[in-house]
Structure formats: C-alpha cells, structure tokens
Image (spheres, rainbow, N blue to C red):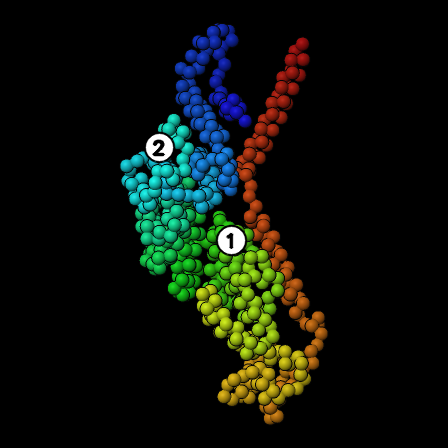
Amino acid sequence: MGVRSVISEIRTPKIPRPNRRAPQSKGFSNLAIIVSQPKKVIDTLAFSLFKIKSYLNHSSLSIPDFRKNDSRCPSTFQNLKEIAALIEVGSYVRELRRIVRAIRWTIQLRRKLKASVLSAFLNYVLVPGSELHSCLYSYLPKEDEQDMELDTATSATQAPAKHSLPELEIYCCWLVLIFLIDQKRYSEAKACSSASIARLKNLNRRTVDILASRLYFYYSLSYELTGDLAEIRGNLLALHRTATLRHDELGQETLLNLLLRNYLHYNLYDQAEKLRSKAPRFEAHSNQQFCRYLFYLGKIRTIQLEYTDAKESLLQAARKAPDAALGFGVICNKWAVIVRLLLGEIPERTIFMQKGMEKALRPYFELTNAVRIGDLELFKTVADKFSNTFSTDRTDNLIVRLRHNVIRTGLRNISISYSRISLADVAKKLRLDSPNPVADAESIVAKAIRDGAIDATLDHANGWMVSKETGDIYSTNEPQVAFNSRIAFCLNMHNEAVRALRFPPNSHKEKEIAEKRRERQQQEQELAKHIAEDDDDEF
C-alpha cells in the first residue's frame, strides 16, 4: 500500500457541478470551487497531509528482531528511535495498541540498555537543557564516549527530532527507571520514580494511561527494594482516587494490586480486604493485572479460612499466568497446594513435575507426601527441614494449621484398616507425644466423628473406636457433587472465553452503514427503473 493508495482512499467533499449551459474552463472551474467552499477543501487537504504523514511514519517501522546480534541488525539506539516514532504515531492517531507494542519491544531491549545509549536517546527525544532532560540525565552514570553504541554516520547527517509529547516524556522516565533498577542503583531509582510520578500527576490523557500503569509498578518496586514500601501508601491511595475520577481503568487495576501488595507485605489482611471490597470493579483490561488480583485475593481468603474460594482464585491465577512468568506460577502453585491440603485434598503428582518448577516445589511435594500418609513424625521432620523455605514463602503459619489435617488423615486410614481398635493403639499409631496420649486420642476421635471425617462410634466404657462398614460410594451424593463441580468449572471457563473475545472497533456501526448503503442502492435502482419506464411510455 503506497502513498497513492492512501490518497485515493480519502473521500473529497461533494462539490456541485458547474452549470452545463455556461461551460467554463478547467482552471476557472477549480477556482470557483475553492472560492465557494474554501473550508471543506482546506479540511480535506489537512486530513490528507496528516494521513500521508502517519503512513510514512508507520511504513518506516519494521518489527525489529532484538534477539539477533549480527552486524545487519540495527543498533539499540536505532531501535529506540523506531519505538519513539511508533509512540508518536500512536499518540497522534490515538491507537493504544501501538503504544502497547512499543512497550513490548522495549521489554525485549531491556538487557541491551546502556547509559551511553540512554543519554543519546534523551538528547534525541527531549530538548537538551530542559527541566526533564536535566533531571533524567543526572541519574545516568557517566561512561566513556568510545562505549557508545550509536550509528555515527546517521547521527552526523540527520539532526535529532525534538518532541514535546507527554507520552514520550513519560516513556523516557520509565526507560531510565527500569535501567536504574536493573543496574541495582535503588536509591537513584527511588528518586527518579518520585520525580516521574510528580510529573505524571498533571497529565490527563488516555494515551498516557498505559505508560503510567507501568510507571506505577516500578515506582512501587523501587520503594519495595529499598524497604520503604510503607512510605508510598498514601501516594498510592491518592493516585488510585485520581485514576478513578479520570476513568482510567487500567490505572485503577494496577494501583489496586499495588495497594493490596503493600498491605499484604505488612500482614494487614483486614485493611486489604476492606479496600478490595469497596474498590470499584469492572471488566479486566490486563491479563497480568487480573492474575495478580486473583493471587492476592486467594491469599486473603486463605488467611480468612475461606479455603474453597481461595483454592478457586489461586488455581485460576496459576492457569491464567503467562508461560514466561515462571516465578509467579511457582508461588501460585505453592499456595494452591497448601490450600488444597487444608481442604483435605491431595494434589496430583503432575503439579510438582511441571517444567522448571520441580526444584522449587520439592519441599511442598515432601510435605504433601507426609500429609497423604498421615505420619505426624514425618510431617514434623519435613517442617523442620524446610523451615527456612516456608518462612521465606510466608507459608509457615499455614503449615502449622496442617498438623490437624495430618492427624485426621492418619485417623481415617486407621478407621478403614480396623473395624475395632483401642484408643491406646490409636495414640501409638498417630505418634502422639503428649503427656496423656489416650485422652488426646479420645478427643481427636470424637471431633473427627462429629465433623464427619470418619464413620465410626466411640465406646468410652471400653476405650474402643468401632468403625462402621463402608458402603457403596455411588449410593451417596458424592458423585453428583463431583460432576456438578466439573460442570461448573467448564461453564465458567466458557463464559470467560466468551468475555475475552475481541471484535474490531465500530463493527456494529460499519454493519449499519453497509445495510443503509445497500438500501440506498436498491432504492436508486428502483428509481432508475421507474424513470426508464416513464421514458419508454413517453416514446
């Protein structure tokens, strides 16, 4: 598609034909048209020039392959210039997908960023000596000129283009911030993020929302890496209120997750639940933010002993997480395993054998094995062996709750194996190390019978536990409950897939326009037919 085709697509305004009885020359005809309707002609020419400029900017952008390192691959500075051009086009035509694509390409370039490249890019995009240029340039470390990865021939012949777009300014702030975090210069990153957020508060443009959401995330990350996460809680709340008033839904999602992470970092689960319940909810715009929200919701539900809802949220977060987010998938599976064990379920072995997760999930595999066997001594050994891992994952409090589940599982195995067994033997098999194991075994058996964990009776006089015969499971409601849960899961997945479908913008309007055009053409054909019939009648 060339410039000619672009121009041909532009519809010129309808201009009345000149009077046939008074023929005019072509030059006088065009002059009369311009004089009679100057506004329409000027608007058409302005729109034509703008569309040609957008096409030329976009046609020069090719999808760069950042993984190649050969001489034919453009330099990092050239790639950053192409990304800046893409952001400029996206801001002019107000297409957010171009800005999303620019962010995706920047993430691929992240490991190739250097201080010299960023300095040259700031000189190219921003006006040297301006406030933002001086602020960002002060955070970059000074390097030798010989290390600069620039195309000197191109930079010598082509003068750098100066832009004043807010999108490019926020993009430069975000680029410098991720560079400082990657270089582990956390104090400079903290100052840079604060200055960037202060500049961002004065902007209210929908094309900035995507870049602002990324800036919010790294703003919180820089303070978390320095251990000062509690300092920005008030700023995050103010930013969330501003995003709500501006109807910035992506910013609301990001800031809500950052606030939940802030509260959960300091074990403020009640405040996190109050914020989550009162925050406005809407359809998710980012899959990554929705996965984080589900994970935080699962953690809150777990602490509040709502294990069924927590299991659903954690499994959904692990299932929706991208394949590249391996660490997020690992932590989701860790919490999901603990929640399923607390529910009395035994996770499948395939969960622990996922690619790239075997080593990280090994402590939880041994813990699951101890719960499945019902061996209390083995459970204590595993808990002591991996205590540092559980403390780092912040699941040590949940593992303390599993002790009762281990005892219940062992008691269930005993009730299946023996039709009648003394309470002393029950205490010995459960390996209870209390001062009065028989009394503890009696209370444990009584509680298990009351909760429905085992089908047995307790003979207090003789000190026996008498198990009842196990009946046919298909004569109970358990198969119906299992099938009902599977059907509900499939229907829920189908509804989510339908909601995730995307349609081209204004497709319904185009359909209506096509139908109106078809009706108009049909009416014109009928009118022409009637005129032709009238002419035939006259002859």
The vertical placement of 314 against 507, above or below, is below
Task: Farthest residue to the front: give it.
Answer: 146
Task: Farthest residue to the bottom: give it.
Answer: 461
Q: Secondary structure at mark 1?
A: loop
The vertical placement of 481 against 68, above or below, is below
| Total count of labels | 2
Is residue 98 found left or right of 128 in the rendered image? right
The residue nearer to you, when weighing 274 against 111, is 111
- Residue lying at 44% horizontally and 52% vertically, measured from the top left: 253
Q: Which mark is residue 109?
A: none
Reading the image, the residue beneath label 1 is 325
Q: How far apart, in angstroms, are the residues tagged by discs 2 and 1?
A: 37 Å
The quarter of the displayed image where residue 409 is located: bottom right
- Residue lying at 56% horizontally and 41% vertically, measured from the top left: 503
- Residue lying at 64% horizontally and 66% vertically, measured from the top left: 481
Reading the image, the residue beneath label 2 is 162
> In the image, what residue type sits under mark 2?
Lys
Percent from the top left, x then y, of residue 517? 58, 28
